Amino acid sequence: MKDKIRIGNILKMKAVGKKISALTAYDFTFSYLLDQSGIDIILVGDSCGNVCAGYETTIPVTMDEMIYHCKSVKRGVKRALLVGDMPFMSYQASEEDGLRNAGRLIKEGGVEAVKLEGGKPICRIIEKIVDVGIPVMGHLGLTPQSVHGYGGYSVRGKRTKEADQIKSDALALQKAGVFAIVLEKIPSHLAKEISKELDIPTIGIGAGKYCDGQILVTYDMLGLFDKMNLKFVRNYGNLAEEIRSSVKQYIEDVQTENFPSANESY
Ligand code: KIV
């Protein structure tokens, strides 16, 4: 195992032009495998709401659910930097909420940093969290917790006004003290401009190749969650099909008494 990844390593990677790799995890088995494979950042995303709980959006995810997932993931991680998502309405209502819930994710969930969605309106909350020593990752562009406000999951920042807003939000987040910003589903030329302008790294998802790093939902890139067909996801596996065919084979073996064999019995 190489040395533990800390915030300083992530910042240095941008400085020396080394791309940052990040994936999501929600349980021990996956985090153990991702960590062993050498991933730089593991995010316990509130996408657990979609892929683990089967919710239509990330909005119903609660702090207690996030803490359960963070704790499970934490046990599998030795090397990667571990970041946990602050779920919807765990920080938007007040600075005190934000501070207490960020504290819970660190203290009870065991993560090393928290991620919040949004720009200028949440900068004051971010400053408070950073001030007490909790590293914060930002998230701009298509922020899924605002899906109802946007009216869907379409690409953000195509029009000049919205692109300018995302750019100024990125600068405001940097000033507020975030150590990195996820840029989700924005045009690659916009992500390039933002990445060039910022001293801190950008981590893209559907934001093109000019970001300082990339993140995907692990279930998507492994072909495990095949309910959605997203343009920006590359399939590195077809686990959904593998699971279905393995389970079909198992059912057949049980029905035909091919399983268990004498060797599989006591
Ligand atoms: O919840 C999540 O998985 C995320 C990533 C898609 C960046 O926020």
Image (cartoon, grey):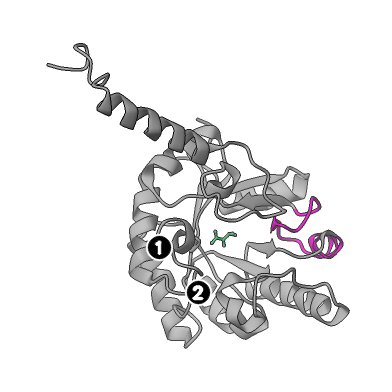
The secondary element bearing badge 1 is classed as helix
Above/below status of 119 relative to 80: below
Identify the residue at horizontal 73%, vertical 50% (top origin): 14
Q: In terms of depth relative to the viewer, which is nearer, 79 or 149?
A: 149
With respect to residue 107, does 229 lie above or below? Answer: above
Q: Residues within 10 Å of mark 2 (few under 14, many from 20)?
A: many
Say which mark, if any, is on residue 106. Answer: 1
Find out if the beta carbon at label 1 lies less than 8 Å from the nearest ligand 1 atom.
no
**Would you say residue 134 sits in the magenta stretch?**
no
Question: Is 25 left, or right, of 16 in this rendering?
Answer: left
Could you say where residue 201 lies in the image, as x and y percent from the top left?
Answer: 71, 57
Q: CA distance from mark 1 to mark 2?
A: 11 Å
Please tell me how many numbered marks the rendered image carries: 2
Contact? badges 1 and 2 (CB < 8 Å): no
Q: Is residue 188 left or right of residue 47?
A: right
Instruction: Specify the amino acid type for callout 2.
Output: Ile
* Front residue of 25 and 150: 150
From the image, tell me which residue sits under label 2.
129
Q: Residues within 10 Å of mark 1 (few under 14, many from 20)?
A: many
For numbered disc 2, what is the local secondary structure?
Answer: helix
Tag 1: amino acid = Ile
What segment is highlighted magenta in the picture? 189-211
Say which mark, if any, is on residue 188: none
Q: Is mark 2 within 8 Å of ligand 1?
A: no
Residue for point 40% across, 70% down = 103
